[in-house]
Amino acid sequence: MPHQIFLKTPLGTASISGDEAGITAIQILDEEIPTSTEIPSFFQLAVQELNDYFKGDLKEFSLKLNPKGTAFQKKVWKALNEIPFGKTCSYLELSRKLGNEKAIRAVASANGKNPLWIVIPCHRVIGSDGSLTGYAGGLSRKQWLLNHENNSSQLSMF
């Protein structure tokens, strides 16, 4: 049975679930829950990396992940991890990258079922016209994450 801890972030309280096999889910909750005081060893890297990400000190996660999903969903989530920090791509571009531009709805659905918010960067996928499109955490959080990554990447050039 997976364990769960809570971590305060600039976007709200993060719920982190997993066990020794890896992190299964990271989501931002709408309600405020106190930060967990006892952090099992298998969560310590997740806490450290999320804190570093939000401080602007981390651009790529190295966590041991164990998301639950179908083979197709996992293929989409793997492709999401290839979108560079501070960059975006459209659902159409992602569908083409996966070899079937007609699968755009299935790709969007798999993107929406991503259980590892932030770490698997589903927030980096936007509409073909550049518009923000759905995000399970809400469009304001998606905009915040994109702004955070753009500001961090610009700062790192100087």
Image (spheres, rainbow, N blue to C red):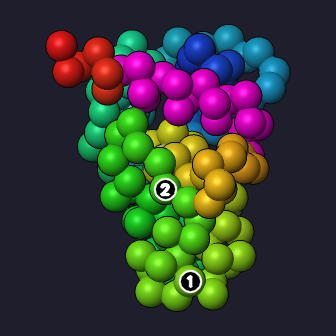
Lateral position of residue 117 relative to residue 66, left or right? right
* Residue 133, horizontal then vertical, whole percent: 72, 50
Of residues 39 and 30, which is closer to you in this image?
30
Question: Sequence order check: which comes first, mark 2 or mark 1?
Answer: 2
Q: Quick one: which residue is furthest to the front in this view?
A: 129
Badge number at residue 27: none
- Vertical position of residue 138 compared to residue 64: above or below: above
Lateral position of residue 79 relative to residue 45, left or right? right
Whole-Å distance between the Cαs marked 2 and 1? 13 Å
| Labels in figure, total | 2
The answer to whether residue 108 shows anywhere in this view is: yes
CB within 8 Å, label 2 to label 1: no
| Amino acid at dot 2 | Cys
* Residue 66, horizontal then vertical, whole percent: 45, 59
Of residues 56 and 66, which is closer to you in this image?
56
* Residue 15, horizontal then vertical, whole percent: 63, 32
Q: Is residue 104 magenta?
A: no
Mark 1 is surrounded, within 10 Å at the Cα level, by few (under 14), some (14 to 19) or many (20 or more) other residues, namely some
> Which residue is identified by label 1?
101
Of residues 144 and 117, which is closer to you in this image?
144
| Amino acid at dot 1 | Glu
> Which residue is identified by label 2?
89
Indicate the secondary structure of the residue bearing disc 1: helix
Lateral position of residue 99 relative to residue 130, left or right? left
Q: Residue at x 73, y 17 (%)?
A: 33
Q: Which residues are magenta?
A: 136-152
